[in-house]
Image (cartoon, rainbow, N blue to C red):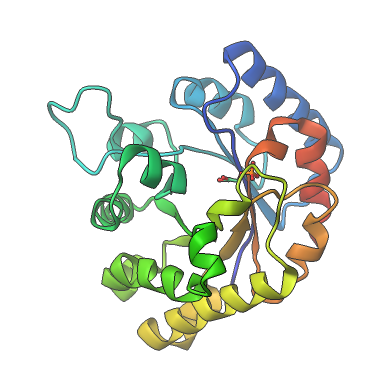
Amino acid sequence: MRSKIIAANWKMNKDEYESKKLTFEILKHLNKNNNTSINKILCVPFPFLSTIINMCSGIEGLFVGAQNCSSNIDGPYTGEVSCLMLKSLSVRYTIVGHSERRDLFGESESLILEKIKRLVAENMIPIYCCGESLEERNKGFHIKKVLNQIEDSIFKLSTKEVKNVIIAYEPIWAIGTGKTADLEDIQEIHLAIRKGIRSKFGRSISKNISILYGGSINALNAKQIFDLSDVDGGLVGGASLNSQDFIDIVNSFN
Ligand code: 13P
């Protein structure tokens, strides 16, 4: 069964006090109204994982995730955080291949594939991001670009490995800009991704894989996006930094 998922990507925002405050406010809302059929995943900065995991423990349907991980198991990799370290904190979900990591930190599709493989080997769940630039979109290459990304990473997984993956389609030009893709375009590309997964891994996997949309989701546009038949939820950046906005987005999903 495709899970309904709203993941928050806090990126490099909030200090410890602010992170706890935001989490506390989200918990306050969820204590009153928690639709447990929707998985809510807070992908928070590394230093605050433990604190926020403790705050969120025992709340059904609420998870705490990371925003990145190392492709290496352990060793002399100064500044890196391994999957095993995350796993030891009971982190299950990790964003990989976000366009900011691809563009600003030079992450290649093959490195992203290594991270995915490392995560699924530990029974963890990668939230794999893909998406096209504005130039690629304007040239009409967007579907091809996204399918190429997926072919170079997700298609190299085994059937067993791919079962543990969530895909997030995030057009780069929609991230943090207030511009979202047209609804028809979102549905078209999500369907193309699902068809690609079906042709490679078969109907059962394609029916069960969750494909999220990300890029300027807010409380006003979320419902229309989530109503699209091949959209299983969202990966939310800016709007997840405000508790009311985040909860409104979660509540718009039914
Ligand atoms: P915004 O919601 O701020 O556009 O960010 C989307 C994103 O990058 C989530 O990973």
Q: Is residue 252 left or right of residue 93?
A: right
Q: Is residue 244 left or right of residue 102?
A: right
Q: Is residue 107 left or right of residue 141?
A: left
Quadrant of residue 17 within the rendered picture: top right
Near-viewer residue (19 or 112)? 112
| Ligand 1 located in image quadrant | top right
Tell me if residue 219 can be seen. yes
**Residue 150 image point, x, y percent:** 38, 69
**Residue 195 image point, x, y percent:** 50, 84
Give the residue drawn at x 44%, y 26%.
Answer: 46
Quadrant of residue 43 within the rendered picture: top right
Which quarter of the rendering shows the C terminus? bottom right
Near-viewer residue (60 or 176)? 176
Give the residue drawn at x 43%, y 61%.
Answer: 165
**Residue 233 image point, x, y percent:** 66, 59
**Residue 20 image point, x, y percent:** 65, 18
Point out the residue furthest to the left here. Answer: 76
Point out the residue furthest to the top here. Answer: 17
Tell me if residue 94 can be seen. no
Say if 228 sits above or below 119 in the image.
below
Give the residue drawn at x 73%, y 52%.
Answer: 36
Near-viewer residue (152 or 33)? 152
Which quarter of the rendering shows the N terminus? bottom right
Say if 162 sits above or below 170 in the image.
below
Q: How many marks?
A: 0
Give the residue drawn at x 78%, y 56%.
Answer: 222
